[in-house]
Image (cartoon, rainbow, N blue to C red):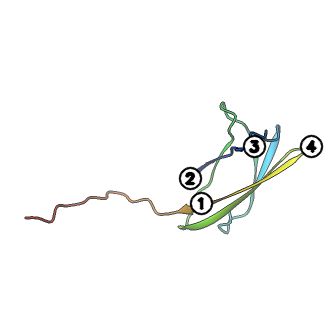
Amino acid sequence: VPTFTFTDPTGADFPTDASVLINWNDGSDPEILAFNHTGNSIPVVTHNYTVNGFYTIDAFIYNMISGYNVSTNVTIVEQIHQFAITNGYY
């Protein structure tokens, strides 16, 4: 399951006591989640993509005073299990 963290390279603070509206753009309904800061002040959310592909994730972080739009692109590929390379020389 991919984990997404929210950071701002400009150093701007995210709204406090906030929620986040996330559109995963994979056909699932947009989600409204609590936007809670973890111990390192970086909010973390997870989402389970069921189909490999290229997705643009759009999020609107907001509280009663302000809001902040962010987006990112992610490529989901199938995880390889039990992969082995066998020497072909006999």
Is there CB contact under 8 Å for labels 2 and 1?
A: yes
Residue at the (63%, 65%) spot, across then down: 55
Q: Which amino acid, by three-letter code, is at mark 2?
A: Pro
| Quadrant of the rendered image containing residue 43 | top right
> In the displayed structure, would residue 82 be above or below residue 62?
below
Question: What's the distance in space between the residues labelled 2 and 3, CA to CA?
Answer: 17 Å
Q: Which residue is mark 2?
A: 2
Mark carried by residue 65: 4
Q: Which residue is mark 1?
A: 74
Q: Which amino acid, by three-letter code, is at mark 4?
A: Ile
Q: Who comes first in sequence, dot 2 or dot 1?
A: 2
Q: Which residue is mark 3?
A: 35
Question: What's the distance in space between the residues labelled 3 and 1, CA to CA?
Answer: 20 Å
Helix, strand or loop under label 2: loop
Q: Who comes first in sequence, dot 3 or dot 1?
A: 3
| Quadrant of the rendered image containing residue 21 | bottom right
Q: Who comes first in sequence, dot 4 or dot 1?
A: 4
Q: Nearer the viewer, residue 9 or 26?
A: 9
